[in-house]
Image (cartoon, grey):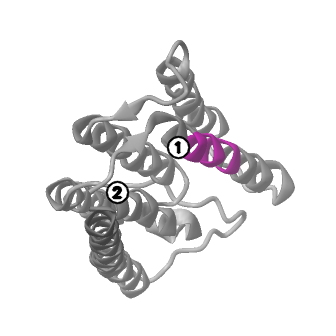
Amino acid sequence: AAPLRLRTLAYIRWAAVIGQALAVVGVHFGLGLELPLMPALSVIAASALLNLLTSLGQPARVWLSDRSAAVFLAYDILQLSALLFLTGGLTNPFALLMLAPVTISATMLPRRVTVVLCALAVAAVTLLIEFHLPLPWGPGGFAFPARFEFGVWTALVLGIVFFAAYAGRVAGESQAMSQALAATEQTLAR
């Protein structure tokens, strides 16, 4: 596993904050769907505030410990879960983004951390099957069949596990190749 820089995770979170805000405002005003705008924007603002607080006063090259990076990514899973709770749960097409924190962990952090984050993400998507506000489809509403939600849950759980395993394997092979190259260069230098 390689260490993660705070700046890298902060940039990723800023991209998430901007994307989430644009999606919520776009759906609410652009598509005219009555989302719980203030609670959703509050969840997004909490991430922006946390990002500011963790970044202020830190040198540009702060490397996070495995534990700090895990907490950072766990927060992202929980924040996205709260936003999905407010905006349709697993019927929200952006539920796919639950894969991102786990994939980042798999490529950069030890396997034990990734396993914990996978378990957290699976628990979150499992809770979102039952506990979420419906998407406001307008007059008459619309409800997805339970089979569809189960299918989305299955795809997300399999995706979380697959992406973590695949990204972890590729990152591990890349790191092993880098270590072998470094050892060869060291031997040649001697």
Query: For this view, does 13 lie left or right of residue 90?
Result: right
**Tag 1 near tag 2, CB within 8 Å:** no
Dominant secondary-structure state across the stretch colored magenta: helix
Residue at position x 33%, y 41% in the image: 69
Work out whether residue 156 or residue 50 is closer to the camera in this orientation and state it.
50
Q: Is residue 160 visible?
A: no
- Above or below residue 171? Residue 70 is above
Residue depicted at 28% across the width and 58% down the height = 127
Q: Among all residues in the image, which is located at the extreme front? A: 190
In the figure, 102 relative to 169: above or below? above
Q: CA distance from mark 1 to mark 2?
A: 12 Å
Instruction: Write down the residue under mark 2.
Output: 108
The quadrant the N terminus occupies is: bottom left
Badge 2 amino acid:
Met
Which amino acid lies under the numbered mark 1 shown in the image of this protein? Thr
Whether residue 66 appears in this view of the structure is yes
In which quadrant is the C terminus drawn? bottom left
Q: Position of residue 77 (x, y in %)?
A: 38, 50
Say which of 170 and 74 sits in front: 170
Q: Judging from the image, what secondary structure is the residue with disc 1 in? A: helix
Within 10 Å of disc 1 (Cα), the crowding (few <14, some 14-19, many 20+) is some
**In the image, residue 43 lies at what x, y percent?**
53, 35
Query: Dot 2, how many residues are within 10 Å of its Cα: few (below 14), some (14-19), or many (20+)?
Result: many
Q: Secondary structure at mark 2?
A: helix
In the rendered image of this protein, does residue 142 appear above or below residue 22? below
Looking at the rendering, the stretch of residues picked out in magenta corresponds to: 11-19
Residue ID for mark 1? 8
